[in-house]
Amino acid sequence: MERERQFISQSLRITKNNFLWGVATSAFQLEGSPYADWSTWDSIFNLNPKVTNHYELYKEDIRLIKNLGVNAYRFSIEWSRIQPSENYWNKDVVKHYQRIIDLLNENNITPMVTIHHFTHPVWFIKKYPWHTRKSIEKFKEYVERLIENIKGVDYWITFNEPYLLILGGYIEGCIPPGQQDLNLAIKALKNILTCHGQLYDMIHLINKNAMISIAHNMAVFAPWLTWNPFDRILAKVAKRFYNHSIIEGFMDGKIRLPIPFRKTIEVDVPIQGKLDFFGINYYTRVHMRFNPFKKLFVEFRHKDINGGGLTDMGWEIYPKGLKKVLRYASRLKVPLIITENGIATKDDNRKIKFIKAHVDVLETAIQEGIDVRGYFYWSLIDNYEWLHGLDARFGLYRVDFRNYRRSPTRAASFYSYIIKSRYH
């Protein structure tokens, strides 16, 4: 540990007593579900239907969380387990998730629950996909019943990364529902954000103490070739589309979606001010390259410019970008929480360096006056990574997917030391 201690000896200290140090997961990525759309989408679930078997081993995993010394845990509730068919509500599954929440609270670990983390019951995505208006009412019916039955949670994330859901599910067609239609994509995004606005009001009526947000993935965008005017235009468009438009929507109720070499699309969404904090998922910087043979003339690329390296998924490691996105998101004038930040690597040293570098940037941002209230590392344990299978090792704890055995990485000890060095 001495080498790891030296890594943070020069670090500034976060002194806020209400700071949330946590880890993040999602239910489907840990436990799968035979009733979810993704189970029919990816054949890997024929061989690994239980993924990490977290559904049965949740007590063991909460012990791992407790051993880390974190004071918060972000996780999701798998909708398809609760409503495997449209007119059936599985009370036992609700009780299962309630036991997780109760155990977290008993151990003084603040639960942060994500209601929608990419997956849907198969019946929903077939009958009420997000581009249809009925999707709003169907999802609201589910959430209202869920909130009325779940106790002990104040922090709620309505949707995880809705823009990625739209880009993957409605433009690229690489994830459910597999559409490739810009007009349907705009309808789906409007419905999802409209749903957030209505859920914000509904949850507050049920729980006066609720803190509600969306978890929005933010990246830094740069031109592939700085001398190429088309690359520069694409980087600017991507930044406004992906990072800025949802923030502007929360500020004035209108999202403005610039489309490369087309007219900007404006959509009214009832989300102005419907935010108690803003969740930011940050991982990387992306370089934009003009390619006339690609959809919307754009190609996404990664390259190691500053020597930080690339992750096992090929993403550039760019800690400085965290402050850039925090600075822009601070325009919202609400507290910010880093709801995801992590690295896919089998190398413990790289994982330690990644955490150290990003926490350093986080602390300088706080010192400069940016109101950040939490940091959640992704992920507690290795899991299923959308479209990348089981090889993207984000976990502080390794998982042997043959026998579900967990084993700590040295990064787990390092993250634990970071937390203890600031509050104990």
Image (cartoon, rainbow, N blue to C red):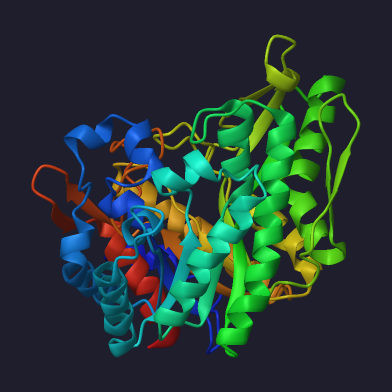
Q: Percent from the top left, x then y, of residue 28?
A: 34, 52
Relative height, residue 78 to residue 420 (above, below): above
Q: Percent from the top left, x then y, of residue 277?
A: 65, 73
Q: Residue at 58% x, 29% y: name it.
A: 179
- Location of the C terminus (image quadrant): bottom left
* Residue farthest to the front, as pictured: 87
Give the image quarter of residue 55.
Answer: bottom left
Q: How many marks?
A: 0
Q: Residue at 43% x, 61% y: name it.
A: 377
Relative height, residue 155 to residue 107 (above, below): above
Q: Percent from the top left, x then y, of residue 346?
A: 29, 42
Q: Percent from the top left, x then y, of residue 82?
A: 34, 62
* Front residue of this view, candidates 251 and 354: 251
Relative height, residue 98 to residue 341 (above, below): below
- Location of the N terminus (image quadrant): bottom left
Can residue 129 be seen in the rendering of this structure?
yes
Left or right: residue 114 compared with residue 26: right
* Residue farthest to the top, as pictured: 293
Can residue 11 be seen in the rendering of this structure?
no
Give the image quarter of residue 347.
Answer: top left
Left or right: residue 146 compared with residue 156: left
* Front residue of this view, candidates 136 and 353: 136
Q: Residue at 31% x, 78% y: name it.
A: 98
* Residue farthest to the left, as pictured: 403
